Amino acid sequence: MSFFGLYGPLTADDIVSINTVAGFLALDDLGGANKDAPPAFDLVVLAGNALLWTLECAVRKARAAGVPLLISGGIGHSTGLLASAVDAHPVYRKALAGQTSEARLLGDIAAMFLGLDQSRLLLEDASTNCGENAHFTRRTLDRLGLAPDAMLLVQDPLMQRRTDASFRQAWADTTSPRLINWPVQIPRLGYREDRIDYLNSPNSKKWTPERFMSLLTGEIPRLTDDKNGYGPRGKGFLPHIDIPTQVSEAWRHIMGSGKFDDRALGRPAGG
């Protein structure tokens, strides 16, 4: 079938455009030329999100490197999705259901089920968005007297580039720390047997097609440095980000196709 969830029918150009935008958003400093000699880091930072495999992989990296893991996240747009993902997990649903922040819920899972020593677990549980993830992470590290030289930054792949920009903004007055982005995987759509699916996503909870397309289409306007974006010419939340022409063209193709808005799902516009 040439449908992705309820979206479609999709053409080959649609899929190429989606993968182009996803590849740009999932900023990855551990792939390519760095794959065989990855850069060193002395702290892993996980920005709270609803994809449990980002936590699993962040813990694995922290344990392998023998460095602390800082989890940042209070109550935000992804909190309900995270709670649902934990509730649906056969093991993690035993984590403390009463936790009131993403960081504390993810921290419980890291300590209870993933073998992370609590002495190496740092929590920032007040932030509600990417910008606060960054600023409150810096505040937490300053309060603890920690000044890492390099941080491995892990986030939902589709929010990785914006998170990187937010952290660069938070440390704009200093040359430290060096940020190393790792989205765990770069999302790609393609045909799996007779249907369109993620080609390289971990087996645990994935994005729903609606969540995936909402994130993918919404990020480019946020990153665009104009009066409507989050850059210096707009809201001022982020530093300027260069968006390659091919990415902008791919986004325009997606938005111009009419296949990914509310009307495509049989809902009133804006509903």
Image (cartoon, rainbow, N blue to C red):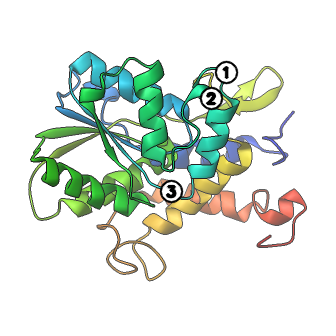
Count residues near mark 3 (Cα–Cα under 10 Å), then give few for <14, some for 14-19, many for 20+: some
Q: Position of residue 246 (x, y in %)?
A: 49, 54
Residue tagged by mark 3? 75
Of the pair 228 and 99, the residue shown nearer to us: 99
Q: Position of residue 66 (x, y in %)?
A: 21, 20
Instruction: Find residue 33 and report its image quarter.
Output: top left
Q: As shown in the figure, which amino acid type bears the numbered disc 2?
A: Arg
Do the residues bearing badges 3 and 1 touch, measured as CB atoms within 8 Å? no
Compared across the picture, whether 19 is left or right of 116 comes to: right
Q: Is residue 26 visible?
A: no
* Quarter of the image where the C terminus is located: bottom right
Q: As shown in the figure, which amino acid type bears the numbered disc 3?
A: Ile
- Identified at 22% across, 39% down, the residue is 151
Element type where label 1 sits in the image: loop
Nearer the N terminus, badge 3 or badge 1? 3
Count residues near mark 2 (Cα–Cα under 10 Å), then give few for <14, some for 14-19, many for 20+: some
Q: Which mark is residue 90?
A: 1
Do the residues bearing badges 2 and 3 touch, measured as CB atoms within 8 Å? no
Q: Is residue 269 visible?
A: yes
Compared across the picture, whether 65 is left or right of 215 comes to: left
